[in-house]
Image (cartoon, rainbow, N blue to C red):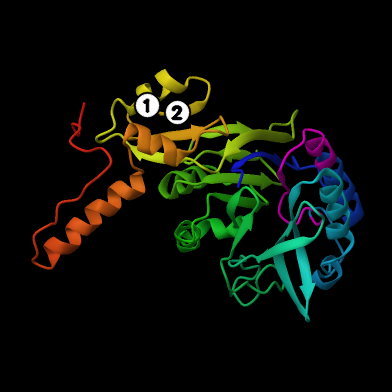
Amino acid sequence: MPTRARIATIAQNGRFHPTIDGNRQYVLHLLDEALNQHPDLVCLPEAFTLPGVRGLTLQQRAEPVPGPTADAVARRARDHRCYVVCPLKRARDGRIYNSAVIIGRDGAICGIYDKACPVTSTHDYTVLEDGVTPGGKIPFFDLDFGRIGVQICFDLGFAENWAALAESGARMVLWPSAYDGGFPLWAFAYIHHYWVVSSVRTGRSRIIDPCGQIMCETNSDFPVAIRDINLDFAVCHLDFNYRIPQQILAKYAGRVDVRRHEPGCSHFVVEPIDPALTVASLQKEFGFETTQQYHDRHREVYRRLREGLAPEPQNALHGRRPQYG
């Protein structure tokens, strides 16, 4: 299965309209701009048809799925053979959800995430987002280039849900939102070692790598950010691996991206560019493991010592290579 994908994200840049259709047409225009760059996935902002709209109840603002917004996005997804994450307020069975609809390359709906943590809209916490029902699950979605997850806006404050996506094996988390998000997004990307892609109504939309580095972002002049990424990547600890980044680059210059963002950072990212190379083949050739594997080896030692048992020898890929330097 291919793991490389071109990812695009859109910022609404605070350009809101007094009608649902006005917002819809503006963001569809931005979606068309993004699709002209042949992406594999485009993420749109949270409930992008609603900011600036006044005088309507939540029930009047919500849409069914399929419905006007989802259908318009689905046509474009099908025509361009591209996944699109389409967030909206969704009406279903008498309830309203703040949802992200994942539309497949064929225009069909291949999954829906309902915001698990909508924010209160009353001082006594009895109403959420004017009547939104929280979702009950933190699902993942297997696309043709890898496993993704979704969180929406206020979900940013609930670390357990971001951890659940990491435990499920998500390699990228999409975050449609009303606001920018800032540092917590970088932190979750670094802590859980997955890509984070934000798409916002105000502020900048960003593509953040699995070590928390902003790789590209929108601005007021360029409301679309796009980057080719590989969901077959490894985040590795420098322990036992101090010379590995240089060795990989010496042999595979231009074919593998190896990044260490900060001089004090103890991690580096290995991301193949050449489709003929995989992380697994590089690990075998150069003898390195991921930070997750490195930490899990320590967890096993801790477990045995806490139980009063002697640690058992482990056979790591780095062999007897020096731990430091």
Residue 18 within the segment the image draws in magenta: no
At horizontal 84% and vertical 55% (from top left) the residue drawn is 74
| Main SS, magenta residues | loop
Instruction: Check disc 2 and give the amino acid type.
Output: Val
Q: Work out whether mark 2 precedes mark 1 in sequence or the reverse, and give the earlier one.
A: 1
**Looking at this view, is 88 or 172 the one in front?**
172
Residue 46 within the segment the image draws in magenta: yes
Magenta-highlighted residues: 31-50
The answer to whether any part of residue 157 appears in the image is: yes
At horizontal 78% and vertical 54% (from top left) the residue drawn is 51
Q: Secondary structure at mark 2?
A: strand
**Image mark for residue 258:** 2
Where is residue 93? Give x, y as percent.
78, 81
User: Cβ–Cβ below 8 Å for labels 2 and 1?
Assistant: yes
Residue marked by disc 1: 245
Q: Secondary structure at mark 1?
A: helix
In the rendered view, tell whether residue 34 sits above or below residue 53.
above
At horizontal 8% and vertical 60% (from top left) the residue drawn is 310
Where is residue 239? Give x, y as percent.
25, 36
In the rendered view, tell whether residue 217 sits above or below residue 130.
above
Position of 122 with respect to 94 (left or right) is left
In the rendered view, tell whether residue 287 sits above or below residue 88.
above
Task: Tell me the quarter of the picture where residue 14 sits.
Answer: top right
The answer to whether any part of residue 17 appears in the image is: no
**Image mark for residue 107:** none
Residue lying furthest bottom? 94
Where is residue 65? Give x, y as percent.
82, 67
In the rendered view, tell whether residue 124 sits above or below residue 225.
below
Graded by Cα atoms within 10 Å as few (under 14), some (14 to 19) or many (20 or more), the crowding at tag 1 reads some
Where is residue 318? Give x, y as percent.
25, 37
Task: Tell me the quarter of the picture where residue 148 sits.
Answer: bottom right
Q: CA distance from mark 2 to mark 1?
A: 6 Å
